[in-house]
Image (cartoon, rainbow, N blue to C red):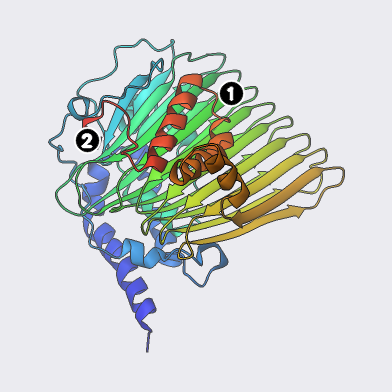
Amino acid sequence: MPKDGELRSMKAEQQYIDLFTQYEDLICRKSVPVLNALRAQAFADFERLGFPSLKGEDYKYTDVEKAFAPDYGININRLNIPVNPYDVFHCDVPNLSTSLYFVVNDSFYDKELPKAHLPEGVYAGGLCRFASEYPEIAARYYGKLAQTSANGVVALNTMLAQDGFVVYVPKHTVVERPIQLVNIFRSDVYTMANRRILFIVEENAEARLLVCDHSIDDVKFFSNQVIEIFAGANARADYYDLEESSVSTTRFSNLFVRQEAHSSVVVNGVTLTNGLTRNNYFVSLEGEGADLSLCGMSVLDKEQQLDTYSLVHHKVPHCTCNELFKNVLNDRAIGAFSGRILVEQGADKTEAYQTNRNLCATRECRMYSKPQLEIYADDVKCSHGMSTGQLDENALFYMQSRGISRDEARMLLSVAFTSDVIEHVRLEALKDRLHKLVEKRFRGELAKCAGCRICK
């Protein structure tokens, strides 16, 4: 006799199997051949794998079946969502001039596009249009990192995703203006969005992408997103992720990175408002001299939860990575971090550093951490460390003795604790804005982009 958890898992998976079986033809008709080409295999992999179980070591703190179990609506028929994102979102980051694009739920908003000129050959826009106009390029990259054979959540995304967002930067091209993508959830019923992002920066090219998540309505939303980042030889690619959704929003994010020789990649994620978030980072360093900065921070309270998993794979010599994740937890919040750095045999002269630091403000919050190093090469410099504790009472006392209230002192120390994660941002205007948003979050204010009507 199956147990309750097993029954729930069977039901959660079966509803998506039934959905795809019944509507496969419609899903394909409302998408494009490049995306459709991977659906059958993704469906077979999802049937075989299902959702990760709590019994597995990598998901022991996140109940995946429970998260996917509600009956979410999916816009398979690609109906227009009645919202003009330009009317409800006005990002006012001082001195940050971006090319601004929107995805509403899981559809690229193409009714109004930025007027800013992009360099010749650069594409920023919808995945369907990109795959239709440049099918060979799209097929060369789409789904090549996000393999469905080992990850049921990625398989589900691949079999259901019908659109997405692409930034394509050809060889020897520099995009000076940052590109900003705003993901907006808008619905009056439970809604799931299967989002895809392709960020392709070819040889000797450079680009920066800022992605912001927002939820408008107070209903349950589910974002199942897959991001694939390709950095060619000597490329420079920055990916910044700002999550300011809602406590009723669940997000599962699987981010994949492949780096060629002497490429430089920054991936930096900041979670300020969420419900349940699971962030997976998979990075493969495949060319000598590749450099990675992988960072993240969160401010969690109430019953918010953030679960972070990372795997950085050093395949060749002379690569470096610096991994830094910090979390501040209050009330009954739950945090988890599992990071693994794998250094292959022959990947000599590797430099890899992994750090996880956490602050717990109450006895009721929980933080689970498991940093890991797996090294099969000689002549490497690798380290990992973890600490979880509370604010220094001596520092609090000192600040109070100087006339600073205890609450203000706690806020200032918490902001200082998270500041080094933000310092890895390579956009000065965004760095300054994030420092201010984090301070507002600790003060209990609405830590949203100024001028954003969504957030008011």
Q: Residue at x 37, y 34 (%)?
A: 212
Amino acid on which disc 1 is placed: Arg
Other-residue count near label 1 (Cα within 10 Å), few / some / many at <14 / 14–19 / ≥20: many
Res. 39 visible in picture: no
Residue at 51% x, 73% y: name it.
Answer: 55
Query: Mark 1 or 2, which is nearer the eye?
Result: 2
Q: Are marks 1 and 2 in contact (CB under 8 Å)?
A: no
Q: Earlier in the sequence, mark 1 or mark 2?
A: 1
What mark, if any, has residue 456 been given in the picture? 2
* Image spot of residue 76 (x, y percent): 21, 48
- In three-dimensional space, the C-alpha distance between marks 1 and 2, rounded to whole angstroms, equals 36 Å
Identify whether 267 is placed above or below 390: above
Name the image quarter holding residue 264: top right
The residue at the point 52 percent across, 58 percent down is 336
Residue 352, given in percent of the width and then of the height, sits at: 73, 42
Taking the image as shown, residue 146 lies to the left or right of residue 344, namely left
Residue under numbered circle 1: 236
Crowd tier of the residue under label 2, counting other residues whose Cα lies within 10 Å: few below 14, some 14–19, many 20 or above: few
